[in-house]
Amino acid sequence: MTCTLLLTALATALWSAASVTPAPGASDPTCRGTLPNHVVPADPGFGRAAFNYGTSRLRAHLNWKDGILRAGTLPDGGSVATIGADGTIRVKQGWWRGQAGRLLITGRRLDRSAPPARANVPTGYGDTGFTPVELLFPTTGCWRVDARQGTAKLSYVVRVVKLAG
């Protein structure tokens, strides 16, 4: 009897804690996107300095504000990311590679179940230096993007949202 009461109390406590703790995601501000780890100099070109997040061997340009990728038409009429007819969010991102090897990029949603993010990485830019990448997020939410090229690895978190309108 005492064991049953103890297990019931424990289950109730765990359920209560889970029900008041929001999962990180598109509607939850606890999904903190990664911010750049250095300032990009004026007119950086396509060298390593142009890419504001990463290491000496692999860098990406995080070109969205506050770690939030906003898909759709911005107030000024431009866009950072577009929304496809199927709802997929597409964004172009510049990468810099400091060593040879194939660049592999994957993504997984952190706040709930979703198909994986995909990346289109072209092969016509050589093994090192600049390469443009198209990232495809199947849904909004809190995403972790992981990249690997040879022994170099790089990860970041981005909150993906769709703009109204």
Image (cartoon, rainbow, N blue to C red):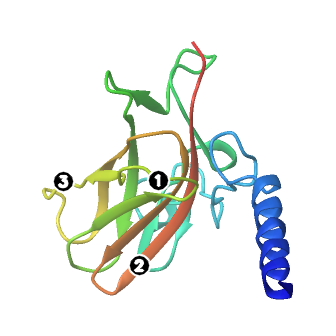
Distance between mark 2 and mark 1 Cα atoms: 24 Å
Q: State the residue in front, 101 or 11.
A: 11
Labelled disc at residue 122:
3
Q: Quadrant of residue 101?
A: bottom left
Hey, what amino acid is under mark 2?
Lys
Return the residue found at the far front: 1
Distance between mark 3 and mark 1 Cα atoms: 28 Å
Hey, what amino acid is under mark 3?
Pro
Q: Which comes before the other along the chain, label 2 or label 1?
A: 1
Which numbered mark, 3 or 2, is in the foreground of this view? 2
Distance between mark 3 and mark 2 Cα atoms: 18 Å
Q: State the residue in front, 49 or 160.
A: 160
Q: Give me the residue at 45% from left, 67% from top.
A: 59
* As drawn, 128 above or below 3: above
Do labels 3 and 2 touch, CB within 8 Å?
no
Q: Give me the residue at 64% from left, 67% from top.
A: 37
What kind of element bears circle 1? loop
Quickly name the residue at label 2: 153
Q: Position of residue 96 (x, y in %)?
A: 37, 65
Q: Quadrant of residue 129?
A: bottom left
Which numbered mark, 3 or 1, is in the foreground of this view? 1
Left or right: where 119 falls relative to 82 = left
Q: Give me the residue at 65% from left, 60% from top.
A: 39
What kind of element bears circle 3? loop
Quickly name the residue at label 1: 113
Q: Which comes before the other along the chain, label 3 or label 1?
A: 1
